Amino acid sequence: MATVEGTVDLDSAGGLDSALDPEQREAVTAPRGPVCVLAGAGTGKTRTITRRIAYLVRTGHVAPGQVLAVTFTARAAGELRTRLRVFGVGGVQARTFHAAALRQLRYFWPRVVGDEQFQVLEGKLRAVGQAAHRAGADTNTESLRDLASEIEWAKASLITPERYPAEVARVRREIPTAAELVAAVYTGYEKLKTEAGLLDFDDLLLHTAAALEAHPEVAGEFRERYRCFVVDEYQDVTPLQQRVLDAWLGERDDLTVVGDANQTIYTFAGATPRYLLDFSRRFPEAVVVRLRRDYRSTPQVVSAANTVISAARGQSAGTRLRLEGQQPPGPEPTFTEYDDEPAEASAVAAAIRRMIADGIAASEIAVLFRVNAQSEVYERALDEVGVPYQVRGGERFFSRPEVRQAMTTLRAAGSAAVNAAAAWEDADGAPEATDPGALVAAVRAVLVPLGLTDEPAAGSAGRQRWESLRALVGLAEELAAVEPGADLARFAAELVTRADASHPPTVQGVTLASLHAAKGLEWDAVYLVGLVDGTLPIQHADGDDTKIEEERRLLYVGVTRARRHLALSWALSRAAGGRRGRRRSRFLYGLIPDSHPTARVSAGRGAAKPKCRICGSPLIGVEALKLRRCSDCPSDIDVELLDRLKAWRSSTAKQQSVPPYVVFTDATLTAIAEHRPADAAALVGIPGIGARKLDRYGPEVLALIATDG
């Protein structure tokens, strides 16, 4: 970190550091008691935390062993301990929430439960599978992962099985199957654990809080031991973790929290920034310090980050941290539009190769994307130019279980097709040339039973499978474009070739990572790729302002990972030669300079740009495209028809045991009620209604439209 002009020596605390800016110094030297540090990206929060702890110890406010600092990763906890040792402050307990709870529970368990020790359940899928089988739920791997995630979210949110259906309805949570079925699996899972004497990781927190709440002598001993608490990444605390923290504190207030609400990207797992934002309400006497000076990134990168987050809707005061870049100036961020994803990946790989040739280490370069399925095309592009890489936070594309299963099925289908063609040739002569579109249709037909649908599946695991299968269809489109005669057998062989090429030895190289996996990391150069509506923001976020804003924060996290070089790009088509109808992410509007060639709305080169049917302005965003009007232009909606459609959707969703949005989203229903399509051709012209939904729901929807109000 660069030395800051006007820094102050902490001589009274033994000269802890001479490079603190005024705000950092205020946080470090704040009186013992409640302190809230709102720390923007790159503002030195870890530096501030460690020096605050050291300051409290050096000035005699607390002994090292009386400090408990909690973080969200073991890596962060280890870094905290290492930095404290540099200051000669050993003995501070720096742990994750779960590690701290496990240590405490093992100590107090004999006194609150008995001599029989518990065992920690390392992985819950087997137990969830048993509970799912008994409840009659699907037991495939993706379904079990989704059910396990729902159980984790419920426990993190302090929601019991009995309350689960009502709570998911109240918060409009996207769930993988019927709420009552999830609740039944949740109940069975808890029963299985209890019978076996097992605790999962969330139980560690629940039982720790319960022990301190119900046993005054246990609480007294704990609170005598630990008198000062520090919580990092406080914006990611769940209700369960906050309950544990409250139990640790009791009536005391010797607490320092550090966080950034602009980096809240885990609400799907139960995290909430409200504890950070409401800190001064809970502790009116709290010292609140805002760290705005960004020591990580150039002013150009910082300006881009500020632009991204300043457009957020419904910002509260605690999120208004406008960063101030402290590094020397650097290059402006670049914005590039490509015809298709392979072209985008090839260009990014070539640029990275040039960077490495210019002296930037491969380990200081990252390619970041929204979903893991996007990694495949970049794995291949980097392989082709000889640049080593590592995939962080996920498996390589061809190592994913759903991709391996699909390859096996495609190989078998290809062999069967070859045998059938050979038999046909023996009987009737050579077959006709293959239609270029036949390969894609054949691949889709093979993948549909494996989970490929017109729209994403519900649940994170199901959606990841869907994204991977959709990526395979994209590869089929790409092969069909360059080899019109390719068949299933040729495609299966192509996948094997690509898979073999994508398994280089594990080396330190360019990082490929999702935006979620990139949180907490930084690189000299960052390429943010695939920035199109439907991917960022993700398709299933449309129609929900809360989810859209979390998607915006994901882009903010991505931008703030870059120290010096930042490149943002998008492609108008998924496959080479495909229709260039995709639109760059709505989050880029206002970020791209007006003078830039791509500052115009892009809807495919040479294609007519979609315009609002009311005011004539270019349409921005998936919802606007569905409605064919700007979101703030007057609506000519048929309210009675919309009510009938919503009642029908609710009934249909209930019959199918799926969330209503799986049938049709609110935006699609609104578009139907505005356009009143009179036939199937007009109905399928509304974005969001594909062939499958037309076949499944078309007759009923058209009947509703034809019904007199």
Image (tube, rainbow, N blue to C red):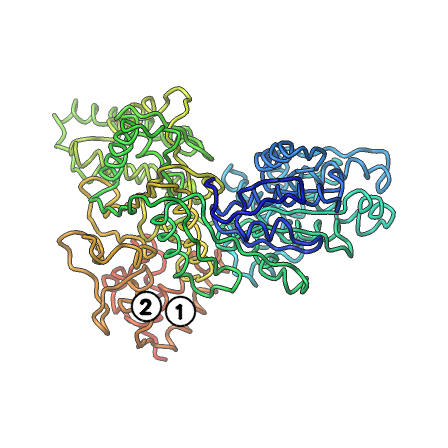
Measuring from the top left, give residue 358's x and y in whole percent: 27, 29
Using residue 246 as the reference point, say whether residue 129 is left or right of it: left
Residue toward you, 406 or 171: 171
Q: Name the residue under label 2.
A: 672
Which residue was labeled with disc 1?
645
Query: With respect to residue 377, does 159 lie above or below?
Result: below
Query: In the image as oriented, which residue stretches furthest toward the top?
Result: 505
Residue 104 sits in which quadrant? Answer: top right
| Kind of residue indicated by mark 1 | Leu
- Residue 280: x and y, percent? 63, 62
Q: For numbered disc 1, what is the local secondary structure?
A: helix
Q: Distance between the residues labelled 2 and 1?
A: 9 Å
Q: Can residue 204 be seen in this view?
A: no
Horizontal and vertical percent position of residue 274: 58, 59
Q: Are marks 2 and 1 in contact (CB under 8 Å)?
A: yes
Q: What residue do we see at 71% from left, 49% from top? A: 244
Q: Which of 644 and 11 is in front in this view?
A: 11
- First in sequence, mark 2 or 1: give its number: 1
Q: How crowded is mark 2: few (under 14 residues within 10 Å), some or many (20 or more)?
A: many
**What is the quadrant of the C terminus in the image?**
bottom left
SS class of the residue under badge 2?
helix
- Residue 610 visible, this angle: yes
Residue 532 position, x and y percent, is 31, 50
Q: Is residue 675 above or below residue 56?
A: below
Residue 498 picture quarter? top left
Q: What residue type is labelled 2?
A: Ile
Comparing 214 with 75, the one in front is 75
